[in-house]
Image: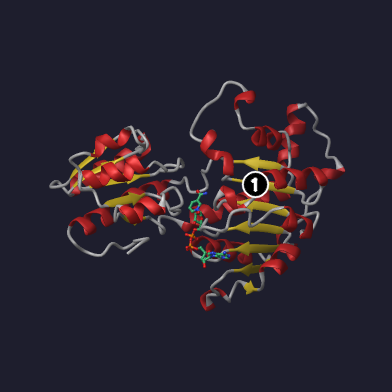
Amino acid sequence: MKALLYNITPEQMPHVQSWRKHHPDDEIETTEDILDAQTVTQAQGFDVASVMQVVDIADEAVYQKLADYGIKHLALRSVGYNIVNWKYVHKYHMLITTTPAYSPRAIAENALTSAMFLLRNWGQIFQNEQKLNFVREPNLMSDEIYNQTVGIIGVGRIGSAVAEMFHALGAKVIAYDVVENAANEAFVEYTDFDTVIKEADILTLHTPLDPGMENMISSEQFKQMKNSALVINQARGPLINTVDLIDALKQGEIAGAALDVLTEENEFFEKQFTDMSELPETYQELAKMPNVVITPHSAYYTKTSVKNMIEHSLIDMKRVYEGKKPVYPVNL
Ligand code: NAD
């Protein structure tokens, strides 16, 4: 098998080298580039290409060139698959695989970290400390997790790990999912979407971003939420309307937000800036708020995840190359 792995970073290399060592017949090449209309030419001569990027693969030329090179499998080293353009995937008969099981716990633990950060007002505490203010002000008094109702939208691999963790800490866990899973009933009370929105002290999203799911949480939902509610989005940015979120935070309709993903993330995640004015206006607004924490799509970023992303994607690349059914196909 000849595979080209795009967007390989130094910490992924040991796992690539380990694969090379154990599979000497495979030719695995890497590049730090993301896949786009320019870099697609590097894939010529390979059997399969693999990517892990936040930037959408929107250009038809990418799919067309991959097809011209005889590449019929694009292996995403991620859980989400919204970066591909499905029209072109279908047009050029491309197989998409993902790595959904690399570590649901990594994201779940980040949701827990986010909830505790917001609940304990650490954003405000850090901001005060930067102003050399060490007074234990009344607005820093927090709640305790076992008194909270955690509302989850989407109880799949990640959502169920989130539910299990909060339940273990004594929180009440309510959830909405289009498909209810009896295996989760030991730690989740399923209910309808509106009830989760109205009753959650901590609302956390763990659905995919499928067509029609954009703006799932917008001003209508913020108005229904408790004024003390904390909102966590580690799923996909467009599930929340960012402008409405900023408005809700300013109006005090909700109390805080932790965002690992944002609609605008393509413009600034994975890049470094020297001046705030270069960043999207929505980010500039959010960055001023002590009750908002933004992380650069790093919820997944643990040693376990990085290792499994490489291994799981290479296993499926090899299976497809050998004519076997992949373990994690999106569109078979
Ligand atoms: P999953 O497929 O196992 O679970 C998704 C769940 O959402 C399923 O139970 C599904 O029935 C449910 N769902 C789908 N549409 C819904 C809707 N309209 N309303 C309510 N529920 C709905 O996926 P997962 O592995 O748990 O991952 C969830 C999402 O997390 C991914 O799609 C990805 O976007 C995101 N993610 C983010 C990071 C990160 O680093 N921030 C890392 C991995 C995954």
The relative height of residue 280 versus residue 91 in the rendered view (above or below) is above
What's the residue at 21%, 39% (across, down)? 44
Q: Position of residue 254 (x, y in %)?
A: 77, 51
Indicate if the residue with disc 1 has its beta carbon within 8 Å of ligand 1.
no
Q: Position of residue 95 (x, y in %)?
A: 30, 56
Indicate left or right for 314 with 140 as reference.
Answer: left
The relative height of residue 293 versus residue 96 in the rendered view (above or below) is above
What's the residue at 63%, 74% (across, down)? 190
Mark 1 lies on a secondary structure that is strand
| Residue found farthest to the right | 138
Colouring rule applied to residues: secondary structure
| Residue found farthest to the top | 274
- Place residue 197 in its image quadrant: bottom right
Indicate left or right for 176 with 71 as reference.
Answer: right
Q: Position of residue 329 (x, y in %)?
A: 34, 61
Q: Position of residue 205 (x, y in %)?
A: 60, 57
- Place residue 325 in its image quadrant: bottom left
Indicate left or right for 200 with 208 as reference.
Answer: right
* Amino acid of disc 1: Ala
What's the residue at 16%, 47% (across, down)? 26
- Which quadrant does the C terminus fall into? bottom left
What's the residue at 25%, 45% (across, down)? 18
| Residue found farthest to the bottom | 182
In the image, 53 versus 88, the foreground residue is: 88
Residue occupied by mark 1: 258
Indicate left or right for 147 with 326 as reference.
Answer: right
Q: Residues within 10 Å of mark 1 (few under 14, many from 20)?
A: many
